[in-house]
Image: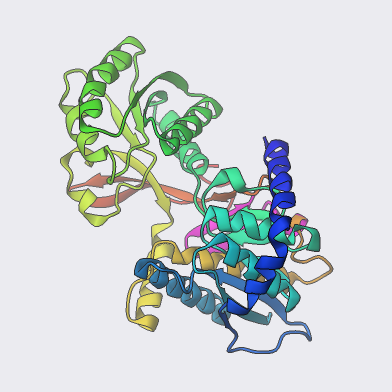
Amino acid sequence: MFAVLYTIRKTLARLIMLFTFVLLAACDDVYVSNPGGGGGGGVVNVALLVPHGAASEQEQKLARDLENAARMAVADLSGVKIDLRVYGTAGQADKARAAALRAVSEGADIIVGPLHAESANAVALAVEGRNINVLAFSNNATIAGGNLFILGQTFNDTANRLARFAARQGKGRILTVYSQNLSGQLGKQAIEQAVTASGGTLAGSVSYELSQRSVFDAVAKIKAAAITNDADSIFMTANTAGALPLLSQMLPETPGLGKDTIQYIGLARWDTPPQTLELPGVQGGWFALPDPGRNNLFRSRFNAKYGAGPHPLAGLAYDGIAAVGALAKSGGPGALGRAQLIQPAGFQGVNGIFRLRPDGTTERGLAVATITDKQVVVISPAPSSFGGAGF
């Protein structure tokens, strides 16, 4: 799989090189912020690529939050000096590539960001021959590999944590319910791989289109599959913006699929947006989330410093800088090389422990939570180190 994806990216690199002249000319339009100045003399030069200049106001706020979180991480480091230079990408792949080339020409040792998968892929391709690694904010595992690492929480990571927990609780006969779009299909694949790896049993799968009629029609199919295959859990890919409100209401009300018989599990976060907690159907369900204690502390500090809570993705910028700082502090040749980035011990971030895997994805130490009386209750804490609970 890794070899195939890497070959695809190499092919794309040759195509993208046709546009090098145009993109280099666009470098003059790249926003650069470097209040710290300098570099050199034992200082680690980090390029932060965020969507400053994006058309969307929401994305502009996210860009500010990512930058602010990164600056918090730099301030928290001790024993290492980071020269953080911020480059705006406007959320566009061509500008992200131009920003990366400029950053490297200005001495960047590593790149943290950008946000979108297409931009991250373009950046990694542009700098892969220059011994520069990229820690992107994406959670799209299909782009990971080579010099490109993704910091986002992947479907596989979430599914593995929940499948292992379910197996230990005697709820390992799992029926997968998924939407027929790309996200749903990737989620189904992640769930089924996780169930097999955990020693559980695949108790079938049922799909639906993203329409109310299709979701209604799927309920009878889900009941039939669950009874026929003796399922004791139903693992859903749906989120609040999709079919979760309907499925979480209808399935437990269906004879034979009550919560006394079936454990409901979610691949998506069931605590965001906050109004999801009000849904009767999600009460008692299981889902995974980053270490709540560490995340809440980060949110509190961020709010105190900047006057508002951070975007949910802002912590990824902090984690990226924290990893760079930890490696740079260890010193030695190639401190930011690939071999050092994938060290098994991993790193401590504001979302808990995490480590970069050889395939370019990130494994995170996740907690398992349920919802009781419209409140999130952790039922299996996030591990404090790899090799602890859940690993």
Residue 267 sits above or below residue 168 on the image: below
The single residue placed furthest to the right in the displayed view is: 333
Residue 35 in which image quadrant:
bottom right
Q: Position of residue 48 (x, y in %)?
A: 59, 72
Task: Please give left or right for residue 218 compared with residue 153 in the image.
Answer: left
Range covered by the magenta-colored residues: 339-356
Is 346 contained in the magenta span? yes
Query: What's the residue at 68%, 51% (across, down)?
Result: 344
Residue 92 sits above or below residue 254 on the image: below
| Residue 77 appearing in the image | no
| Residue 210 appearing in the image | yes
Query: What's the residue at 21%, 18% (across, down)?
Result: 256
Query: What's the residue at 63%, 71% (across, down)?
Result: 99
Question: In the depicted view, which residue is nearer to us: 95 or 377?
Answer: 95
Task: Please give left or right for residue 324 compared with residue 301 in the image.
Answer: right
Residue 389 sits above or below residue 210 on the image: below
Quarter the N terminus occupies:
top right
